[in-house]
Amino acid sequence: MTDKLKKFKGSEDYVVTQELMNAVNVAIALQKPLLIKGEPGTGKTMLAESISEALNMKLLIWNIKSTTKAQEGLYVYDTVQRLYDSQFGEGDVSNIKKYIKLGTLGESFTSDEQVVLLIDEIDKADLEFPNDLLWELDKMEFYVTETKETIKTKTRPIVIITSNAEKELPDAFLRRCIFHYIEFPTREKMEEIVNVHFDCINENLLNQAMDAFYKIRDMRDIQKKPSTSELLDWLQALMLSGIAVERIIEEIPYAGVLLKKNQDIDAMYEIKEKGYSLKRW
Amino acid sequence: MFLDFFYLLRAKGLQVSLNEWLSLVEALDKGLIGSSLTEFYHLCRSILIKSETEYDKFDQIFAEYFQGIKSPEDLPADFWDWLNNDVKLRDINDKTVLDKFQAELEELLKRFQERMEEQKERHDGGNYWIGTGGTSTMGHSGYNPAGIRVGSEGRHKTAVQVAGERKFKDFRQDNVLNIRQFQMAFRKLRQYSARIESAKTELDIDATIDETCNNAGMLRLVYDKPRKNTIKLLILFDSDGSMTAYSTLCNRLFQAVSKSSHFKDLKVYYFHNCVYDHLFTTPYCRKGDWVDTEWVLSNLNSEYKVIFVGDGTMSPSELTMKGGNATIGLFNNETGMQWLNKFKKKYNKVIWLNPILKIDWEHVYGGHTLLMIGEIFNMFELTLDGLEAGIKKLLVK
């Protein structure tokens, strides 16, 4: 690894696996977007924050919703504002540039310093959305029709894209990405993660809670399995309440923090009692 | 460099493109892999493979090419058990030149296999036997299981992730239709209406022009509610039995439907061969995991569009006789035909998608019942064309 390449080594409050670290560094070196997939709660979004912190770069987040259009990320031409201004004689209407507002992607292109761009949950958008961004992500430039200007990157941003696999992404798009699938952390890794988030946690409490947590994750009838963030919230709740350690596995207190569906909570208690559940859906 | 590997990947059905391969070469050029084979493995995987469902296949091919092992299954099962826990990845510190890996590995592999024949039990923490957490020279060849193991965790992972829909899961890539194609077809299943409660966010151009004219040329904006898809869909899958052969295809259809977020409502139930008193809520069709069919008929109003997915082949008695229900222990007072006709009566828009190709309908085993059902519902073959034709049928006013 040459010195001039920036290298990501994880940050203080984010535990990163060797594989993920490699994937990030490959994406940075090859200047390709990094596509991150994985179960909810495995820290996909956190990764971008951690990279920006570790490499000391600004983080720009483009949150994708079902209605997001590719164009919005580049720029928006505010015609209505211009029309208003012309009617009421406010400002200089002849200057179109004033009404071109850059989107998040556009902003990351024009930034003087290298930034980290997070395109969060790209699978939320319309099926064609990724295809509409192929050229822009490949060449890192786009053309503004209204001003006949081409906006080019000064420094190529580090692009992190996350997906929850709600929709299939097109092949042409995938081919341009570096891909990494974040696996659900093993127990040891999870302990590491917990230790990063809590300074001093009672070993006994942690063990009991972990036992319970992985037991619940193993229950087949539970639809929405609890993830890392839920475990962290739960540990917080357990510590604050000061509940007796030996009661954790027996009672699963504050189950609502771990499981977000009523049916799941019912099913969990039923399985704990009888070993099986008939309640479903 | 490794061009054979590239062609091997393609020959095994992984769609690796030239661009991706060149990216890998570029990465190697830039010296991105540091000093271990594990890193090389991860590098290849992150650049060449774009779906966790293909990790498993990639692991096998990687092992085949770089270790000369035909497939991981060739190792005795006990070895996998011993090695399953806590294998630490070892760094091959002094080997940075890739070309040497193969010769090195062949030699190590030989030793590994010799040791395999010698070893008769599990070893952890030692320095000679093949085991976990030890300092044995087999650390190098230990890479071999470790490397594959890394991939295998991916395999288990995928299995956990899809537990709920496992039966419908298949990693095969050789099917022509993919989920995306199905999804594109389902996009056509839309019926827009603005009569839905939502905020007025869309500019109504015609009304704006009218209002502005009325306002003596001064701009007055008028907004309208955005139009939304009003399609409600009830989809019923035949699961189990003769449908097993089509699980790949049905899996993709299922995935495509469940990932299509543009329906106003989507209900999915399962049945075995034909619909009777109960509709199952899981593809496993276990007794108890069900809702009453009557409940569905009375609670889902006639606006729902209904898609049956099934091969329609069964014993004629399952359609025409009381008690014809093929599930052991269940008795139906009304025949399968009667139940199907209830659906036809309640819902105006019903189609049946059949994974058996249309040209075979008359000749296939069980074709008799298939044609009987075809007389009740419009039946289409489960291909892209068939699906599109069916969707058109559902949308006819």
Image: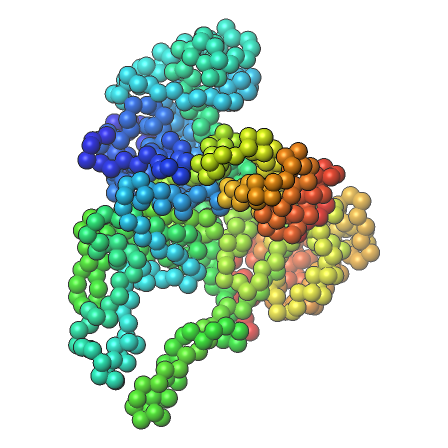
From the viewer's perspective, tell me whether residue A117 is left or right of residue A93.
right
Res B283 visible: no
From the viewer's perspective, tell me whether residue B61 is left or right of residue B328.
left
Percent of width and height locating residue B140: 38, 16
- Residue A162 vertical position relative to residue B396 in the rendered view, above or below: above
Quick one: quadrant of the N terminus of chain A? top left
Which one is in front, B344 or B121?
B121
Percent of width and height locating residue A261: 61, 51
Which one is in front, B384 or A49?
A49
Which one is in front, B170 or B344?
B170
Picture colour scheme: rainbow
Res B267 visible: yes
Percent of width and height locating residue B369: 69, 53
Q: How many marks?
A: 0
**Residue drawn at the location 35% of the way across and 85% of the way down:** B220
Residue B105 sits in quarter? top left
- Residue B335 vertical position relative to residue B163 in the rendered view, above or below: below
Percent of width and height locating residue A188: 50, 29
**Residue drawn at the location 36% of the way across and 48% of the way down:** A161
**Residue drawn at the location 65% of the way across and 56% of the way down:** B371
**Residue drawn at the location 61% of the way across and 40% of the way down:** A242
